[in-house]
Image (cartoon, helix red, strand yellow):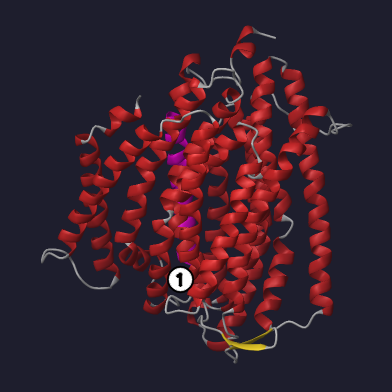
Amino acid sequence: MSQQAISIPYPPAAGERRDSRAAGFIGHAKLISALTLLSRILGVARESVMARYFGAGVVASAFTVAFRIPNLFRKLLGEGALSASFIPLYAQALKSGDRAQADRFAAAAVNLLMVILLALTVIGEAGLYATLRFVSLRPDYRLIVQLTAIMLPYVLLICGTAFLGSILQVHRRFALPALTPVLLNIIHIAVIIIGARILLLGGSGGEQRIALQTRLAYWLAGFVLVAGVLQIAMLLPALRRVGFRPVWVGNFWIAPVKKMLRLSVPVALSAGVLQLSVILDTAITVLLTPDPHGGGQLHLLGHVVTQPMAVGSVFRLYVAQILYQFPLGVFAIAVGTAIFPGLGADALDRDRAKFKRVLRQGIIFTLLEGLPASLGLIIVRYPLIRVLFQRGRFTETDTHWVALSLVFYAAAIWAFSLQQILNRAYYALHDMTTPLVMSLVTLALNTAVEIPLSFTRLREAGIAAGTLVSFAVQAVVMLIMLDRRIGGLGLKTIGLNAGKMVLACAFMGVACMGVSSSFVFPHGTNHLASLEQLAILLVLGTTVYCGACAVLRLHKDLAR
């Protein structure tokens, strides 16, 4: 082995200095952010096109629920349990200098993941077939099961893509893994637009429109699988360039894989709890939404419950989640992705000074973007929703409910962002139990808050309110516990910087409120007026916040 392989945990990118790792994650985070921004823009465009041709009706809600199933497995396995335990172990294996052993470990881990996913897919398809064959379902529920059956094999493809991407991330090749969602979004948009024109969907109405939307949803589900195959194909050349080839390992039950699985169990349970929370939110929304063909009451445990939500609640909540996840993916997840390999390599060193310094920078950098994103999204919510979604079958009433939910989701962006860093810090320390326990607490708190609120005037927005409360509590508690765990993270420094950020956000909020109430501000709800409002508020808010941060010298604090 060369000295280079011994001295650093993963190969440097071209032209990169070896001693830049401690602070270099910010540069990588900016690269990931830029590429993720492209993906998220296309993702929002995808949902905008979906809203135009499907509205917020039965078919849109059914496809939304079905498409979430493979993505839940991606978060649980591909980007969850196995990746969280694999990345630190693989980084440490490369740092030890035995590249051949590290590559054998990576190949064995990929083999294991594929076997697990193939088994889950077969079992899932059998269960879905049995449900369709033997269970009497109302039409919209039946459509959910049918679309899920078509897209379930995407579990194997998307989880494989995510795990192979984690190998590239350890080698500090972040670009391609961040670009794979772009391909899915492009195919998604193309299928909807071309399919709608082939089916003449725009001019139809009533039951005929629902039938055509259903057929288009089937086409879209099939092309999701095509996109999954192409996503994996995108990564293979880059994997070969870093010296890894996804080959079959005769015996993948080796010691590093066993250790990875031991570490993965609590992470899987933690990720499972989080995804259970997502499933539970969706299930609650579906159960509390009346049958579009009649009804309005739910018979539950001998009691008759009036269903408080309106048709389209599932899709509207999904739209609100897409919008708050836009800044979350562009900033927070990018920082977490960039920082994790370095944290994983340094966390178990005897001297944790570098680990703590990089972690503190990551937290401050995340809050620097997360706090204004929370306030900014609340400020621009109405013009943003109108510009992106309010057309065709998506009405002003839909906009109102999405905007209400978005207030709560947006207010939680800073907490979501902080959680991305904190979870990775615990995983780097091989502490997989604390995130699990906190996930259970979050699930209980979330459920206890959202169900009662769903029966108030908030209705579907009560789901978002429960998410805000639970994640805010989890983020603060886990930060305090981590500070004690590693012997001082520098909470005073973090708190002082956060205070400056809140002050800068206050200046931004006052400026935006002032201009929006002035006579020069364009008013109205049409597309052009909304676009002008959005442009003015974005430019003004960004300028004021960045200016306030410069005056408060936050860039100096981040460099420490």
User: Which image quarter is the N terminus in?
Assistant: top right
Q: Residue furthest right?
A: 250
Figure label count? 1
Q: Residue furthest left?
A: 519
Residue 64 makes an appearance in the image: no
The vertical placement of 6 against 110, above or below, is above
Q: Which residue is mark 1?
A: 461
Counting from the top left corner in percent of width and height, residue 431 is at: 64, 36
Position of 162 compared to 53: left or right? right
Residue situated in front as seen by the camera: 287 or 299: 299
Q: Quadrant of residue 555?
A: top left
Counting from the top left corner in percent of width and height, residue 502 is at: 29, 46
Instruction: Please provide the residue range marked out in magenta.
Output: 26-52
Q: Quadrant of residue 134?
A: bottom right
Position of 265 compared to 172: left or right? right
Q: Main secondary structure of the magenta part?
A: helix
The residue lying at 59 percent from left, 50 percent from top is 438
The vertical placement of 482 against 324, above or below, is above
Q: Residue furthest bottom?
A: 294
Residue situated in front as seen by the camera: 478 or 179: 478
Residue situated in front as seen by the camera: 227 or 461: 461
Membership of 198 in magenta stretch? no
Counting from the top left corner in percent of width and height, residue 376 is at: 31, 54
Instruction: Provide the secondary structure element on which disc 1 rests.
Output: helix
Membership of 41 in magenta stretch? yes
Q: Quadrant of residue 388?
A: bottom left
The residue lying at 67 percent from left, 57 percent from top is 70
The vertical placement of 169 against 44, above or below, is above
User: What residue type is disc 1 on?
Assistant: Ala
Residue situated in front as seen by the camera: 536 or 479: 479
